[in-house]
Structure formats: C-alpha cells, structure tokens
Amino acid sequence: MLATQAISCGVLSLCFLIMFNAERRSSFMKWLCAFLKGPKDGEPNRRRPRVTAGEETTLWEEPVRPKKEDPPRHNNEEMDHALALALADDAKNTKERNHDKGDNNDEELARAIQDSLNMNPCQPYNPYAPSQDRPRGYRVCGGCKHEIGHGHYLSCMEMYWHPQCFRCFSCRHPIRETEFTLLRTDPYHKLCYKELHHPKCDVCLQFIPTNRTSLIEYRAHPFWGQKYCPLHERDRTPRCCSCEKMEPRNTKYMSLGDGRSLCMECLDSAIMDTGECQPLYHSIRDYYEGMNMKLDQQIPMLLVERQALNEAMEGESKVPHHMPETRGLCLSEEQTVTSILRRPRIGANRLLDMRTQPQKLTRRCEVTAILVLFGLPRLLTGSILAHELMHGWLRLKGFRNLKAEVEEGICQVMSYLWLESEILPATSRYGQPSTSYASSSSSSYRPPPSKKGGISHTEKKLGEFFLHQIANDTSSAYGDGFRTAYAAVNKYGLRQTLNHIRLTGGFPV
C-alpha cells in the first residue's frame, strides 16, 4: 500500500509539474477557478475563501471537519490512482483544444481571482458600500464617483480624485495649482471661491479686506443693504443726502453746490425750485382738509438752499435741533430769506445757472412761512411739508408750550400718514388700515396720490425708505416722540389724541 501511495503521489506531482510548465492546461484551470469561486449551491462541505478587513486583505480557507461517513484512509489509494490516470489522459486531450481556446483560460482564471477577492459570504459586493466594508486601499473618485484603480490620483482631507476629474466646481476647469479651496466635497480655484463667497465693497468694488484679527469687517446700510469698507466712512466718500447711499466708484453723484450730493435715482424726481413745489404743497393742504384739519391761513412756502435754511434757524428763538440735518422749518419770526427762483440746469455732475432772490417775510399770524431744502425727491419733500404744516396747524389752533417729544412726535405721525397715502394706500406699515388713524374724526377721507399716473417702482422704494427712517429714528424728540404718538393715534384715533394733547399737553396712554 505504501508503494502504491508513493506511486500515486509521484504521478500527481508529475502531472502538476506538466500542467504548470505548459502554457495552457484547461482542466487544471477549471479546477483552480472552481476552487477560487467557492462551493456552489448545495455543496456546504466544500471550502470557501473569505475576505477579512485588517491591516492587509488576505484570503484564508476555513478548515473542514471530516464527517462520520467519510471513507477510511486506507481506501484513498484507489482514488489517488484514478485521479492520476484521469489527469494524464485529460492532459493528452487538452493539447488538441489549446490552439482554439487561446486566452480563454487565462481570462477565466483572472475573473475567478477577482471574484474571490470581492467575495463576501454575508452580502453581495457593493462598490459604493461604506468605507468600513471596503478593503484597505479602496478609493472612490470625488468627481466621477467611480472607483480609483491603479495609477495616479489626488487626495486631500480623505477625498480622492482622478487627475482629470479634479476640476473647479465653479468654472469647471482643471485645478493645476498647488493651493485650492475645498468647500465640503467641492474643490474650487482660490480666485473662483473668492469671487463667489468673499464679499465685495459696493463703493470701491474691491474685495473687502480683513481686519487685524483676520476677520472680514464691513458696514451695511440697514435698509438698502449696501456693503462697504469701514474706511469709506472716513475718506469723504459722497453720500446721497436723500437716500443715504454711498457713491460707488463707477458712478458720479450730482453736486447740489451747498455740500450736498444727490444720487441719480433721487435726482429723477427731485424738486428744484419754489414754483415746481407749489402743486405738491397744495395737494398736502388738501390732505389736511380731508382729515378735517383745514388750515385757515395761507402760509407762504419757499424752497431754499442749505445756507439760507441754517441762517433762518439761527433767527428762530426756539427750534429743536434734529441730527444729522434739518431739512425743513416752520418760521414764526419775520425774516428775509433767499429762495430758489428758477430751476437750475444740470451740467457735468453739478447744477448750473441757479437763480435766487431774497424775500421779506412779514408776520401776519402765528406762522410766517414754511421753508424746505431744494433738490430733494418729491416724496421726501412732501413728507417734510406735511411735518412742517402740522407745526403750523398746532400754532394756528392754539397749542402752546408743548414738549419737543409731543410736538415733533405728532408732526412725524402726519408726515408718516401722508407717505402712506402716497405709496401704501390700502394698508399701513404695521398692517392696520390707514383710515383707522382718523377714525375718531368726522371723515375717513383718503385722497388720491398727488402724482398723476402713480409712482414708479424706484420712487415707491424711496418712499418705503423714508417710512423706515421715520419709524427707526433714534432721537428722543423725533424717534421716541413718533413711536409714542403713533401708538396713541393707532389706539384712540387722531382727533381724540389731538384733544388729549390740547387738554394735558401729552399723549393718551
């Protein structure tokens, strides 16, 4: 028996040697492929290769325990002998088929090896499975989302790319620089990322620089949202005297000649002389009359330059100072005031041929005249006129010695209500019907907008800004006074609020 076994082993060794030295041996290839692929269904006793994830991926074979019905060891010699004869006979027959099959066996072997590496006894192989289920070295391209095989690749912060897939998420051009920006999983050129996410100054049109602590610091207008470098608050950059926007470097504002500048949007509806302002003034007087607040006296109205308004303020005995600038005045003293007689021509960003004339104002009643700065947009001019007319109405009706917060507050309410009637005819800014403010008066008169044909979108936006200015004024007289007066008028109505002011000198609570 020992001799037979030795012969059998020798035959087996010889057969295996022949098969490895020959270029192609199909039977051995099939056997090796079957071995690598593992057992088929219904063959639980065959050995199955397993993949384990660790420092290196290795293949190991699970040992098989012999069953009780396995044949005894001394009967294996006949099987060995039969196997040797079968292999030798198959090798002879294979020579005739090798010429036709070519590389099929090599390809089958390669597929079997690949399948064995990808095989998982618990679940099917998934190329996009979580990283902990993948063998070490498995990489998925962040661009095309396919597996990165052999060859060059790029990696950054546990992300991988094929070189040709490493492209800017913005411009889609390849990234060849050594420095780039990674936003989540998307790479960018540094300049492309800066263009998309780094804020630019709306004045100098450059990227807003960082401060000493490497943070981006800028200023922003609370209504318009215009962003600008803090430097422009100190470098004398012109600011529109109406809407408060700063002048961008690619735009020129109109100089009004008295230290004020006007942007092109505000210039479009600006009122430049006294004659041009008269229709607006009369429409606001009609507005008062519709609210049962008719002015019995004809109060003169003049458009003046900044210097003339400042001189008139100095001649008044008691005028509340409103920062940053007073734009209207209700005179009660006799003075000589220089007014704008004729609309100036508009030249290269400045006004030309402005004609003025001095005018002697005599006192015939408690109010001498109403003065308003020239060159302001129609809605702003109208809100100033509505405010100053309320001063005149209070004086003509005998309201004396009111506190600044009370008088300026109720005047701001009238200015606010007139603006609402021009741009928000249906509802007020706080969602209340505008007619409710006059609900205690005998009329709920709602005059049509003073401008025929309605107002443009730009002018409406300006009107909303002027409402915002009134509602958010920080001064005690104009800001706090308005908010207190507005709440009283909204609760009790305009007529009852005015009666309470006449009796007590304050607002009802």
Image (spheres, rainbow, N blue to C red):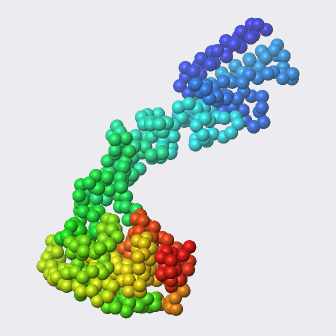
Q: Where is residue 286 in the image (x, y as percent from the top left)?
A: 39, 90
Q: Position of residue 478 (x, y in %)?
A: 40, 70
* 223 up-or-down from 331: above or below: above
Q: Position of residue 245 (x, y in %)?
A: 31, 65
Can you see residue 79? yes
Seen at 19% across and 81% down, the residue is 336
* 204 up-or-down from 102: above or below: below
> Which residue in the rendered view is the most extreme toward the right?
68
Horizontal placement of 308 versus 159: left or right? left
* 25 up-or-down from 423: above or below: above
Can you see residue 429? no
Q: How many marks?
A: 0
Seen at 26% across and 54% down, the residue is 234
Q: Position of residue 208 (x, y in %)?
A: 32, 51
Seen at 28% across and 78% down, the residue is 372
Seen at 38% across and 65% down, the residue is 224
**The N terminus is located in which quarter?**
top right
